[in-house]
Image: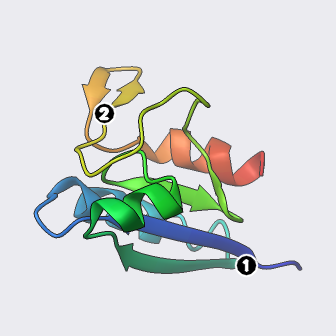
Amino acid sequence: METVEVTLLYFDDCPNWLVANERLDALRSEFPEMSITCHIVDTPAEAERARFRGSPSILVDGIDAFADEDDPVGLSCRVYQTPDGPAGAPTIDQLRQALRHR
């Protein structure tokens, strides 16, 4: 089974990265091949280099699973469109879909 590398990018003052991390942890039993790394992005230069589209950002095998090409890059909070409306983190089902379609 091939490892799925998940990187959770965030900045320190963002409360939503903890929600995203908890949801990813909840999926570990379904995706035992998943490896999760958390990485703080704390400068505008690093945000630009990492193509950071806001906190939290979730990369699956190096690709932002929820970004559009024209999404802005920078140190900001990220909003996800969920079935229940805008939220600070994707739902468990949205994360599951992203992991399945990597």
Q: Secondary structure at mark 1?
A: loop
In the foreground, 10 or 46 = 46
Task: Name which residue lies at 50% across and 56% down.
Answer: 58
**Measured from the top left, where is residue 92 in percent x and y?**
46, 47
Left or right side of 45 for 65: right
- Measure the C-alpha gap from mark 2 to mark 1: 28 Å
Q: Secondary structure at mark 2?
A: loop
Task: Name which residue lies at 41% across and 41% down.
Answer: 90
Q: Quadrant of residue 48?
A: bottom left
Residue under pointer 1: 33
Residue under pointer 2: 79
- First in sequence: mark 2 vs mark 1: 1
Against 37, residue 31 (above or below) is above
Question: Seen from this angle, which residue lies furthest right?
Answer: 1
In the foreground, 5 or 50 = 50
> What scheme was used to colour the molecule?
rainbow
Task: Name which residue lies at 59% across and 69% down.
Answer: 6
Q: Residues within 10 Å of mark 1 (few under 14, many from 20)?
A: few
Left or right side of 100 for 17: left
**Measured from the top left, where is residue 17 in percent x and y?**
28, 60
